[in-house]
Amino acid sequence: MKKKILVIEDDADVLEITSAVLKAAEFEVVRSEGTNNVIDLVERHHPDLVLTDYMLPGLSGGQICTLIKQNKGTSKLPVILMSAYKKEAIALGNFSFDAYVKKPFDINYLVSVIRRYIN
């Protein structure tokens, strides 16, 4: 059975490319351009991992991570944060993300990081 990834990204082009790369790597992809009802999305689709951009309208990727990690039913779900910001700057927010991928990213690196958390 294919592993399922929820991708949250507000840039339609990045979302499209990321989704295509993940599908080519044999993952099932659930896409979201918005941050509304993240916990509902997670509970409805039961992803094996969440891949989220940091800079989003509404909630930031860091806030999404916090919501997921503080929810009893989703706290063990791996969350990978993507951003053009430096990891150290984001880490100051004390978000409990499992991994960080700097944008622009190498697609092979992204897939290898994802596999590390869901295989």
Image (cartoon, helix red, strand yellow):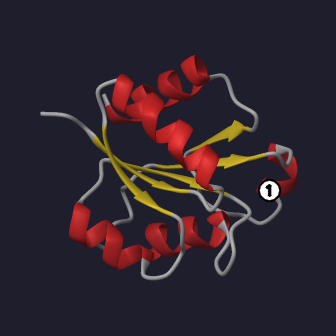
**On the picture, is 32 further left or further right than 74?**
right
Q: Amino acid at mark 1?
A: Ile
Residue 2: give x, y in percent of width and height: 20, 34
x and y percentages locating residue 118 in the rendered image: 34, 35
Circle 1 is placed at which residue position? Answer: 90
Q: Residues within 10 Å of mark 1 (few under 14, many from 20)?
A: some
Percent position (x, y) of residue 82?
Answer: 66, 46
Q: Quadrant of the N terminus?
A: top left
Check the image and report above or below for 38 versus 24. below
Q: In this rendering, is residue 24 above or below 80?
A: above
Q: Nearer the viewer, residue 76 or 47?
A: 47
Please give the name of the residue rendered at 66% of the width and 65% of the height, measured from the top-left corner.
62
> What SS does tag 1 mark?
helix
Residue 17 against residue 83 in the figure, above or below: above
- Residue 65 percent across, percent down from the top left: 55, 64
Q: Could you tell whether 69 is left or right of 61 in the image? A: left
Residue projecting furthest to the left = 1
Instruction: Reply above or below: 106 against 58.
Output: above
Q: Residue at x 60, y 54 (%)?
A: 12
Q: Nearer the viewer, residue 98 or 86?
A: 86
Q: Quadrant of the C terminus?
A: top left
Query: Does residue 89 appear to the left or right of 8 in the view shown?
Result: right
Left or right, 29 with reference to 116 = left
Residue 4 placement: quadrant: top left
The structure residue drawn at horizontal position 62% and vertical position 62%, both measured from the top left corner, is 10
